[in-house]
């Protein structure tokens, strides 16, 4: 796992490292040298510098470019410097590196590479004035753009921006921040990498999930095992109007392809003729209904969950009383792992807190931002400004695992915070969340660590989606294309361990 530090944690870690004996000037040099070594610079190069330590990294880069014989120029937004930044700027001045102050007539189109050193990860608020003008000019240029630490204007904690640099490469320093992954990040940075300059975290780090981190959940299976070894799961959903959702979760085989031993697909009786022809490897469990929507039968639900390790509830089930009664029963009586998605989240927001708090099951919620807003009672923009803190606080308060969907996925139990960067734009299509629910139901059934199981399911889903997008393109791919690529992703994990 790679460490991810909040902006405050990064600031404190930087200060602690300096207090521990490594001068800030030395850290600045390490940062500039690391970035210099990470890029194939093509002259002429423009170092576009703000007034803080981020600019100081740029001055180090400028001196190294100069020493290597690569033509470069420094463009200052203003003649203001941090103490360490001033030290390296003076070195550049002594070396007679060309420097100019930004003015409206400057044209960036003549540069082949631009180093964005305007703002660092500590930037908050909206870009305005000269900085906003310069950022627009950088984005209009045809140059290869390298953002130092983070894209100027992008919030290091949230990944949100009113206006920010669009980079070809972003080189983070010390550790990644959440803003390198969340919300708008994937749309404004084509590539990213991190360089270690010797800063140790001063506080607890978040973690970025990588393929190697979840190998243990996908070990080749033993001959001396059976379907029960890998867990019985139930997928509960569907209605006359929204039958497609549960079909994607089970009938497109998301759960079976993700390793479930047995999958029970529970849906209204009237959907039987539609469902049974598509779930040859799964079991259909008919539910009582009223006008195409499930109705509650205690004996049916008790039988359904009697031997299942995981149950996923809510995909296309509707929000009538029958569905709500089923969810209440599950919360009161089910002792396995319950995954609630889609309509189930709407129903959960209506159920009294006491029923939720006194539940018998381990609970996993999988909202997108609008659903999470409904669950928390917070405005969407308020969540987007502090997604990690809001997610952790909610999970800790409710004693559950939260999977907050987005361009990158947040997974937390309130204590640990995991970010899954797998996924792509083509997954913004109907049914993608239902596919994830099927994968979750499977992986959570045969994994001990539920938080890691949820993160692993998000990784499998995102990686399968990425493979689908490479084949179908972001516009034409469907959720079914993601399902079709699940076996390849999991097989790759098995082969990588040999």
Image: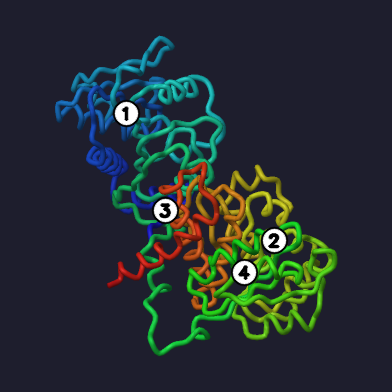
Q: Which residue is mark 1?
A: 86
Chain-order first, disc 4 or disc 1: 1
Instruction: Give the class, few, some or many, for how many residues have Cα within 10 Å of label 1's Cα (few <14, many ≥20).
Output: some
Mark with earlier residue (1, 2) = 1
Lower position in the chain sequence, tag 3 or tag 2: 2
Nearer to us of marks 4 and 2 is 4
Q: Is residue 131 left or right of residue 289?
A: left
Q: In the rendered view, would you say 87 is above or below 341?
A: above
Mark 3 → mark 1, Cα distance in angstroms: 47 Å
| Alpha carbon distance from label 3 to label 2 | 26 Å
On screen, residue 115 versus residue 405, left or right, reads left
Badge 3 is on which residue? Answer: 467
Residue found farthest to the bottom = 224
In the image, is 368 to the left or to the right of 175? right
- Give the Cα separation between the discs numbered 1 and 2: 65 Å
Say whether residue 204 is visible. Answer: no
Of marks 4 and 3, the one in the foreground: 4
Measured as percent of width and height from the top left, residue 166 is found at 43, 32
């Amino acid at each position: 796992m790679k460490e991810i530090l909040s902006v405050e944690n990064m600031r404190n870690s930087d200060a602690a490292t300096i207090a521990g004996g490594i001068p800030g000037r030395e850290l600045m040099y390490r940062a500039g040298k690391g970035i210099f070594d990470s890029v194939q610079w093509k002259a002429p190069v423009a170092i576009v510098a703000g007034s803080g330590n981020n600019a100081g990294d740029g001055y180090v880069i400028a001196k190294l470019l100069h020493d290597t014989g690569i033509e470069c120029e420094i463009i200052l937004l203003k003649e203001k410097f941090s103490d360490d930044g001033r030290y390296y700027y003076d070195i550049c001045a002594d070396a007679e590196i060309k420097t100019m102050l930004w003015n409206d007539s400057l044209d960036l189109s003549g540069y082949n590479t631009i180093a964005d050193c305007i703002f660092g990860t500590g930037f908050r608020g909206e870009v305005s004035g000269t900085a906003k003008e310069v950022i627009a000019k950088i984005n209009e240029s045809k140059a290869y753009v390298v953002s130092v630490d983070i894209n100027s204007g992008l919030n290091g904690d949230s990944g949100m921006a009113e206006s920010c640099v669009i980079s070809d490469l972003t080189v983070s320093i010390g550790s990644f921040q959440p803003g390198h992954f969340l919300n708008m990040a994937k749309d404004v940075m084509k590539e990213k990498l991190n360089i270690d300059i010797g800063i140790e975290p001063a506080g607890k780090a978040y973690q970025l999930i990588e393929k190697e981190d979840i190998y243990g959940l996908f070990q080749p299976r033993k001959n001396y095992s059976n379907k029960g070894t890998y867990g019985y799961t139930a997928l509960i959903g569907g209605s006359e109007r929204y039958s497609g959702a549960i079909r994607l979760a089970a009938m497109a085989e998301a759960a079976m392809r993700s390793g479930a031993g047995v999958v029970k697909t529970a849906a209204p009786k009237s959907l039987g003729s539609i469902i049974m022809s598509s779930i040859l490897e799964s079991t259909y469990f008919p539910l009582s209904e009223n006008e195409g929507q499930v109705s509650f039968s205690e004996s049916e639900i008790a039988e359904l969950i009697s031997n299942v390790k995981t149950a996923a509830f809510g995909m296309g089930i509707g929000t009538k009383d029958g569905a709500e009664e089923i969810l209440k029963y599950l919360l009161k009586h089910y002792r396995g792992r319950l995954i609630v998605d889609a309509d189930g989240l709407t129903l959960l927001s209506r159920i009294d807190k006491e029923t939720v708090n006194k539940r018998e099951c381990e609970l996993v919620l999988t909202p997108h931002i609008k659903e999470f807003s409904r669950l928390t009672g917070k405005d969407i923009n308020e969540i987007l400004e502090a997604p990690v803190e809001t997610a952790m606080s909610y999970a800790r308060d409710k004693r559950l695992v939260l999977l907050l969907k987005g361009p990158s996925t947040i997974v937390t139990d309130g204590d640990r915070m995991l970010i899954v960067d797998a996924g792509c734009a083509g997954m913004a299509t109907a049914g993608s969340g239902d596919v994830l629910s099927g994968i979750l139901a499977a992986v959570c059934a045969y994994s001990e660590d539920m938080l890691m199981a949820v993160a692993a399911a998000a990784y499998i889903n995102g990686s399968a989606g990425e493979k689908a997008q490479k084949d179908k393109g972001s516009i034409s791919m469907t959720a079914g294309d993601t399902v079709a690529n699940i076996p390849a992703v999991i097989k790759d994990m098995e082969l990588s361990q040999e």
